[in-house]
Each structure stands twice: as structure tokens, then as C-alpha cells.
Amino acid sequence: MSFSHREHVERLLATATAAARAAARVHREAARRGGGRWVSEKTASSDFVSDVDMASQEAAMAVIAERHPGHAILAEEEGGGRAGAAGGEHLWLVDPLDGTTNFLHGHPYHAASVAVWDGKGPVAAAVDAQALGKVWTAARGLGARENGERVRVSGTARTSRYLLGTGFPFKAHAALPEYLAQLDRALRRTAGVRRTGAAAIDLAYVANGILDGFWESRLGPWDFGAGALLVTEAGGVVERVEGGGVGPVAGSVMAANSEEGLKSLRLILGLQRRSAANRTG
């Protein structure tokens, strides 16, 4: 990596970290006063947006816009889209409050997730979980860190000893039978399955070795935008559940500590990897 390229990546990482910190500061201040002042449902009875989501989104986007006015931004909540300069390749993916339901119930598993991608994939990322006292960061070619210390994926080789993370399809109840069949298979063939309610934290836990693998069939790009880089920079592997690379568009995500682990996990869950000719994204 040339000095100029490294400097560029580190600059993007500094912005991602500052933007996530700005959003997490909103979380912290809101928690002190008792959480969100108003809550509305987006698409399902368990899909909430609060004043904290909106305020933290504004805080994160303001940092990015000030430092990189020509970059595009895609954030989760209403008003979170901003077009970049013509011909620009950088896209910021912002989840201002991943785990809104957790936050509204006082559950500590919530975080701000900020990442920037270019035509080659994720470049820099930060996940700030203020209630856990954890900040995870990663930059392309520079590794992944937790509170400044380098992290690596687990060395677990036997999938029977895997501890997995997942998420429930709470917006798509029609998908529950298929998902529950996967969960049944995973519970019978691994050491267990955990669900934090925040995909950004799940993927950070794969990066630091707490979890050995993760899968979820329906995620927005802001949900995994930072976590995908955390995992790969920590030595792990990330793909779509159906196979193929992960791009900055909605879809499935599967992560593991190794290529072999990913293949075994797909077999355990009864998932088929589609051929390259039939894959998209």
C-alpha cells in the first residue's frame, strides 16, 4: 500500500469513526433522559423509528457531509439519501441506530454503524456501541480493531463447536417457516445460536472471535456495510447466503471465520450455493 493510498484510507477511517461517535453520543444523551420521545412504526409492528434514530442520523451525516461534500450517502431513515458528485465512486452507508427496539427497551445491544464503500468494496468502517463501551473499526488493508486493539476471528475449526449469530425476519413473517427450519438445524449441529438484534454487533462479534459465524437472509446495506469489512479485515469470510460477493445493496449475509467454516455452515443450514451464472449482487 502506497503512502498516499494509506493516507487516503486513514482519512476515510477517521471520518467513519467520527460519524459513528457523533451518532453514539446522541444515543448516550437520549438514554440519560429516558430514551426516545416519540416512536412510530415503519413497515411492521416491531419495526420502529424514534427521534433518536433521526437525531443520530443527522449527526452522522453532518460529519460526513462536512468532510467529504462530494460523496454520496445512503442512510436507513427517511431523508438519509444524498447524491454525490458526478462520477464519484464513494458511497457512505449509515445505520444511525442499529437495534432501535433494543435501545427503546434499555437493552445494551445497539450501535451506530458507518462505512464507506467504493467500486472495489468497503474501504473504512466504524461501529460504536456506546452502551457496551465498544468501538470497532476497520480499514482496507489495515486490519480490524476493538477499542484500538487488533482483533482476529476465532480459530474454531469444528462447526459442531461453532457459536452462531443470526437475526429474525420480523418484517417478513411468510419467511419464518424456512428460517425456523434453518434455526432447528443449526441448534442441533452447533454449540448454539445467539440473536443480539443488531447485525452490526453480530458481525463485530465474528470479527473479534466471540461468534464463529453469522447468517441472516434479509438485511439493508447499512446493516452490514461496516460489519462486512470488520470480518474480512479480521481474517474472516463474508458472502451472500446464496453465494457470491456482498455488495452495497439489500440482501442476505453469511460470515464465518474461514472458507471451510462458511461451506460447512451452509451445509448445516441446508442452504445451496447458486452457480455463478445465477447469482447477482
Image (cartoon, grey):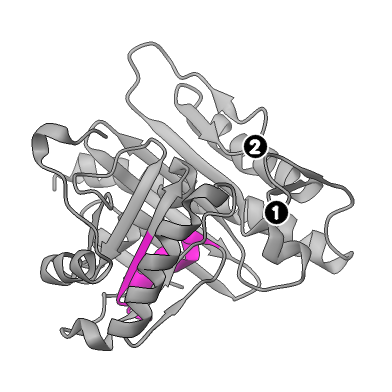
3 left or right of 216 in image: left
* Nearer the observer, 209 or 198: 198
Q: Residue 203 location in percent, x, y?
A: 39, 64
18 left or right of 266 in image: right
Would you call the spot at circle 1 few (<14 residues within 10 Å), some (14-19), or many (20 or more)?
few
* Nearer the observer, 115 or 37: 37
Would you call the spot at circle 2 few (<14 residues within 10 Å), some (14-19), or many (20 or more)?
some
| Residue at (15, 83) in percent of width and height | 157
Compared with 124, 208 (above or below) is below
Q: Residue 81 location in percent, x, y?
A: 56, 26
Secondary structure under tag 1 reads: loop
The three-letter amino acid code for the residue at tag 1 is Ser
| Residue at (67, 39) in percent of width and height | 43
Choose the circle earlier in sequence order: 1 or 2.
Answer: 1
Q: Residue 45 location in percent, x, y?
A: 73, 50
Q: Which image quadrant is residue 33 in?
A: bottom right
Specify whether residue 115 is in view.
Answer: yes
Q: Which image quadrant is residue 279 in?
A: top left
Identify the residue under disc 1.
46
Question: What segment carries the magenta color?
Answer: 198-215
221 left or right of 161 in image: right
| Residue at (25, 68) in percent of width and height | 256
Identify the residue under disc 2.
77
**Measured Cα–Cα span from mark 1 to mark 2:** 15 Å
* Nearer the observer, 37 or 268: 268
